[in-house]
Image (tube, helix red, strand yellow):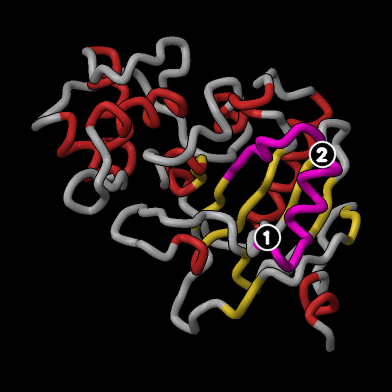
Amino acid sequence: MSRAGLAAKVRPMQCVAAPSPNFDARPKDAAIDILLMHYTGMQSGAAAVARLCDPDSRVSSHYTVDEDGTVYQHVAEEYRAWHAGVSYWAGETNVNARSIGIEIVNPGHEFGYRAFPEKQIVAVMELARGILTRHRMPPERVLGHSDVAPARKQDPGEKFPWKRLAEAGIGLWPDKPAVMRGTFEANLRAFGYGVRPEMDVSLEAMTLAFQRHWRPHVLNGVPDAECEGILAALVAQTA
């Protein structure tokens, strides 16, 4: 079978086949237990899909969800797509090996970041539910690209409706704030973030990534009392 045929071998829900040659085999011992959300950060969905399918780009994802809700499949879930780059989560430095990547069409912070349309979010949720049904993924491992690569990435960003997804059973959202024990940095590490020495990222950048996901209404990179309470609740929920 050709690489294009392998890439599109599994096509769950109503997906348009747009096979990418940019994938390889997962390591034999790698569990598929991370769902990683991205935005495309390009000026159009068509340009993003073209790049993900371009052999010269050396990047791909398993799926792309366009603004009208159309879902494209690029790589079958059993294979490793190339979407996370240099990244870290909870001791894992090869995030591609154990993740499924969803690209969500949005111009991003560089080209005019905007709210995600309703049809798009509904499609993302349907796609994610299917993925979570097929793979054993703890809710705290439904993550954004900025969570695993905070020095490089901002996506899917503060406009992405993480709370709504969590309320639908996709990912984690904190219960009422808790009392933090230990430092903010130590709790980030306990939750999964790659603080120094795991990654060469400042605490400010790491805190900003945390805020984009779990405290999006104030983005200042400051681990204030509200952030501490939210992080303590997350750590308690996953202990």
Could you tell me which residue is drawn at 70 percent across and 65 percent down? 56
Name the spot of residue 192 as percent of width and height, x first.
Answer: 31, 47
Q: Which residue is mark 2?
A: 45
Q: Is residue 78 above or below residue 43?
A: below
| Residue 188 seen from this side | yes
Residue at horizontal 24%, vertical 20%?
A: 223
Depicted 154 relative to depicted 19: above or below? above
- Tell me which amino acid carries mark 1: Ser
Residue 227 position by quadrant: top left
Amino acid found under the numbered disc labelled 2: Gly
N-term-proximal mark, 1 vs 2? 2
Specify the quadrant that holds the C terminus. top left
Q: Is residue 233 visible?
A: no
**Residue 46 place in picture, x, y as percent:** 86, 43
Residue farthest front in this picture:
56
Relative side of 128 to 5, left or right: left
Mark 1 lies on a secondary structure that is loop
Q: Residues within 10 Å of mark 2 (few under 14, many from 20)?
A: many
As drawn, the label of residue 57 is 1
Quadrant hosting residue 8: bottom right
x and y percent of residue 85 in the render? Answer: 49, 56
Residue 134 badge: none
Q: Which residues are magenta?
A: 37-57
Q: Nearer the viewer, residue 122 or 93?
A: 93
> Cβ–Cβ below 8 Å for labels 1 and 2?
no
The answer to which image quadrant residue 176 occupies is top left
The Cα–Cα distance between marks 1 and 2, rounded to whole angstroms, is 16 Å
* Residue at 23 percent of width and 21 percent of height: 228
Verify whether residue 23 appears in magenta: no
